[in-house]
Amino acid sequence: MLGRAYAALVTRFGYFGPAGTFTEMALLDWPPALEGERTAYPSVDATLAAVRSGEVDAGMVPIENSVEGGVTATLDALAAGEPLIVVGERLVRIRFVLAARDGMPLARVRTIGTHSHAWAQIRGWVGAHLPEATYVPTLSTASAAYDLAPGGEGRHDAAVCAPIAAAAAGLTVLADDIGDFKRAVTRFVLVAKPRHIPPPTGADKTTLVLYQRSDHAGGLMALLEQFAARGINMTRLESRPTKHSMGDYCFSVDIEGHVLDERVGEALTGLKRICADVVFLGSYPRADKARAGIAPHNADEDFRAANAWLAGLRGIVDWADGRG
Amino acid sequence: MLGRAYAALVTRFGYFGPAGTFTEMALLDWPPALEGERTAYPSVDATLAAVRSGEVDAGMVPIENSVEGGVTATLDALAAGEPLIVVGERLVRIRFVLAARDGMPLARVRTIGTHSHAWAQIRGWVGAHLPEATYVPTLSTASAAYDLAPGGEGRHDAAVCAPIAAAAAGLTVLADDIGDFKRAVTRFVLVAKPRHIPPPTGADKTTLVLYQRSDHAGGLMALLEQFAARGINMTRLESRPTKHSMGDYCFSVDIEGHVLDERVGEALTGLKRICADVVFLGSYPRADKARAGIAPHNADEDFRAANAWLAGLRGIVDWADGRG
Amino acid sequence: MLGRAYAALVTRFGYFGPAGTFTEMALLDWPPALEGERTAYPSVDATLAAVRSGEVDAGMVPIENSVEGGVTATLDALAAGEPLIVVGERLVRIRFVLAARDGMPLARVRTIGTHSHAWAQIRGWVGAHLPEATYVPTLSTASAAYDLAPGGEGRHDAAVCAPIAAAAAGLTVLADDIGDFKRAVTRFVLVAKPRHIPPPTGADKTTLVLYQRSDHAGGLMALLEQFAARGINMTRLESRPTKHSMGDYCFSVDIEGHVLDERVGEALTGLKRICADVVFLGSYPRADKARAGIAPHNADEDFRAANAWLAGLRGIVDWADGRG
Amino acid sequence: MLGRAYAALVTRFGYFGPAGTFTEMALLDWPPALEGERTAYPSVDATLAAVRSGEVDAGMVPIENSVEGGVTATLDALAAGEPLIVVGERLVRIRFVLAARDGMPLARVRTIGTHSHAWAQIRGWVGAHLPEATYVPTLSTASAAYDLAPGGEGRHDAAVCAPIAAAAAGLTVLADDIGDFKRAVTRFVLVAKPRHIPPPTGADKTTLVLYQRSDHAGGLMALLEQFAARGINMTRLESRPTKHSMGDYCFSVDIEGHVLDERVGEALTGLKRICADVVFLGSYPRADKARAGIAPHNADEDFRAANAWLAGLRGIVDWADGRG
């Protein structure tokens, strides 16, 4: 959670909508958002733009393995433009339903509307139960449902969406929990301007983008070594093209720990030296509350003891210099 | 290129269609395909299924930074199911046009149809020139164009697509080369059943999927070390969830070199030992013909000399055993 | 132990003498030597020369932490000249006595003869019990004793030596077990011409000298990585000047495992490639019989399985080539 | 050199004598010693004890590749007992002469007295020119000469020693520059109590003893990685038994750079964390004045820029905390 004083200032929340998407579900799982204002935006970009302009105080967007799209878009959009940082994360269990207007039997469904990432996760079920059905792309899973609501202009026979979207659109559920991967979860992050970093909880993550220096031998190994040498676990790594040309890469990574942890701080300065650039995208409590494993001799007190010892050695020089 | 004898057997080509997509452009850049049969399939999955079933001998699909979608889908689809390998690659320079039915002036365009990945690459241009325009998702960039052809049921005012799709659909180009990243290229791969590996050319790539063993300390560092210890460059790395749960990862990587190169072979056996699984997805000539840099002491002759030396040492044992 | 057939051919043993040294004790702990001929030589060099010339079949010399001298001399002498290999090792618990001619009381001892390395290990005791005594260097601990025997020309009051040397010289023991480090052991090795390597026992060591290539970035780390990548433990490491100038170094190392072990063989070929030279000084059973810890996935069967898998992949190429 | 103010306080110098040894030559090459008091001690231990007791302000002793003995003894003696640090080093080109009393022709020399380490370096010459001669151990090369001076009790025919020792003892040089390795140099260090560290010159060395933690996986690699990650070169490495039992090791190392250099400081704190103990044995100007190569991005300003950047990130937290 955010610090108390700061949290009071965050009352206006944006999210990648419309209402009824899994992203809204993630936001509704963030307690302060229940009492605040919640505004839907039509895309990840629009949500982040609203945070950057100050229209909202924070925005919830999908970041990993999403059914709403926006995964790589989110990573790229966070790293470019006015600085934003992640201040929290939520995991949402993905449960898809096939829903249609009243009176449409399952056997007659020939066209299915949904977002392309959702489609990718139900192809197995569709192949088994509606092998003749074809795909109609929509802007989001929720809009696939709303297009079938009274007054909607949807021409597909059924929509694949979250249960709350089907309910909100007044549709009938033809089949429940049809995802091919029953344990699928999507990760969402709440982003804000860099005015505050949530204090360490012992179960934190830090998100970074590392731009490789082309003149640096060793490459990725040298970057990872900065984490390994301090016993820091990495929980996500992606090489991302820098958009200049194929083959020029940066790395988007999540690590265990908080920027205020000594081991993380030292790893960050090491990376800052050897990378062309390091973009800090936030330290925040993990949604799953799993505490960071700290390898032996890498706790804050180990770093402080070592620093005190070095200061003692260096003091020999100072003492002598002052003595002359 | 494929070996000559084998190449004669590959005459039926599938691709992620419809005609007019950048994927078809990649296939038309593969000389044997010009003389062979070319069949469009509606998705990456359908294309790969046609290769697996034997309906076609090889299939062209997008694999990296695509505007047609299918990037991560392709990686996942290749790694799962009946084995397939990459036998060639092509790079296509992406050039988007905004095209509409005759008589539609640029100023009146309010809705734009295209694939979501193409939309991501023209948002800058749209924001500057048609800030009021909204997005209509379509199955592919080509289908956005065909939907506007006579008899098409497209309801969008204009399509964003490849020049050849606009021409094929009889549309008028309202604006040319509107992509935000002028140097964008997409990488396509030709996949086939593992009956043949193209012989080494000195400018080859090898594609692998590495499944991490959870009991193996060191993790990714230990995997990368297998390449680093033999001076092998990595040209792409992505961590991919294994679909079992968030946090269980495999790594999709491209390296320089061919499975028949000694340094690559030894790295592969090292990975095979320390990984839970290694999926070999092919060794094939690079589209850009850039020769692999071989670090000093890592050429085939260096490996052979070292192996001969070891055999000599071990021969001391054998000689003595045989002597008694 | 040596293989049976070969062992029968090794009947003449040399050692760094004279009789009564700890080196002779090491040789007497090697069963075949009890039945064979045993010849003392005046130095490590002379012992090795006798092995090289064929005058003896094998020679016992100190190699680590010795009280007889010869440690670094042994390492250098093995690495230079006609190839020799280590075929066995023995550990001897070092127990020093202070001994003198009959009638010399402890209180009157003013001069103490012994080898300089023994002197280094009893200075604490001498400081506490005979603070006025001065040191007289001798060729070995045993010769310090023999010089005091009837007819000897020793002018020191007492000798520091092994118990058997004091007894052989007919001296009286004034003080027993006077070493400052009660757990001190010295390591001795039996060396022979490279005609036979003792077969693997599962508790083996391999001794190497690694000459660093000056043009090789990474240096020692790169060498050690060859062991680490295969889970091989190192039990001794010394940087040794190559005698050309200060700062040009080679490394003398002992590792766990046998040259016939797959993981050791692969590490050796890796080193052979990246080093300027690798001198193999033998694989032999450990004196302490401690079995080598084999890290997971580094057993011989792991290597064989990985090699078989690679051969299968490469077979795809061969099959196709043969088919055309 | 020492800082000026402090240097004025260092006027009494001890050295491993007697006069005429190479160690005295090293001390005479240290300008302040020319004007100060110089006292010879009979051993490295006695010299260090005189420094520890305050009898002298600093002591010169051999530390690497010595002909006077004391190499490993010096390393061990420095690491144990009351803390001492190295404040300077000198390299001395070793030149041996064979010298005898007037009237002794070369052809009649049958016994040669010298220190055992000197003997090791002239065996080639002796084998070629006096193959029948035998070795008589002496306390030092200088004492081998003095024993032949009028009144001396030497019973050897000739001495191998430094030219100045032969001259001081009034001996005749029978053969000059007889060392087998013409480029041999010995390294000597000046040690003192840890009251002052010579200020950085840009061409400095730091000497450390690293005690490995038995529970730390990765071992030596992890220690060396602390240097490698900051581009620090190592100029000497020796594994040394800790005297508790064979196999428990510490590492004696020299690295390029000064404890006040940022990269060295950070490496030291890293080592302090992962080692059981780190003994700092001084930072001092190199005798050869070779400036430390600083790898790109490892200069002091790189560390300071990275630390400032981290402080900025952490300031986000502080600012917010102070705000509530």
Image (cartoon, coloured by chain):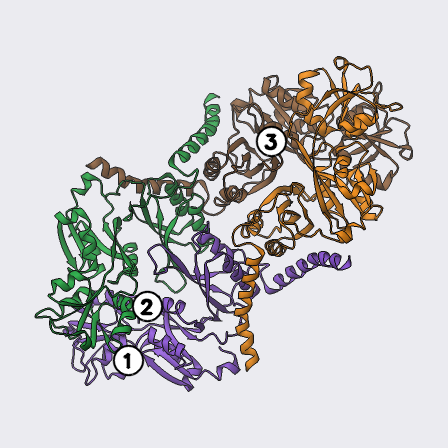
Chain colours: A orange, B brown, C green, D purple
Give how far across and how far down residue C178 sits, in percent.
24, 66
Q: What is the distance, in whole Å, between disc 3 and disc 1 at their CAs?
A: 80 Å
Camera-side residue of D252 and B79: D252
Q: Residue at x 41, y 54 (%)?
A: C212
Q: Secondary structure at mark 2?
A: loop
- Asked whether residue A99 is in view, the answer is yes
Dot 3 corresponds to which residue? B244
Dot 2 corresponds to which residue? D182
Q: Secondary structure at mark 1?
A: helix
Residue C231 is labelled as: none
Dot 1 corresponds to which residue? D165
Discs 1 and 2 share one subunit: yes
Where is residue D20, by image quadrant?
bottom left
Type of amino acid under label 1: Ala
Q: Nearer the viewer, mark 1 or mark 2?
A: 1
Q: What is the distance, in whole Å, between disc 2 and disc 3 at their CAs?
A: 68 Å
Taking the image as shown, residue A199 lies to the left or right of residue C195, namely right
Give how far across and how far down residue B323 sits, in percent.
20, 37
Give how far across and how far down residue B240 sits, in percent.
61, 36
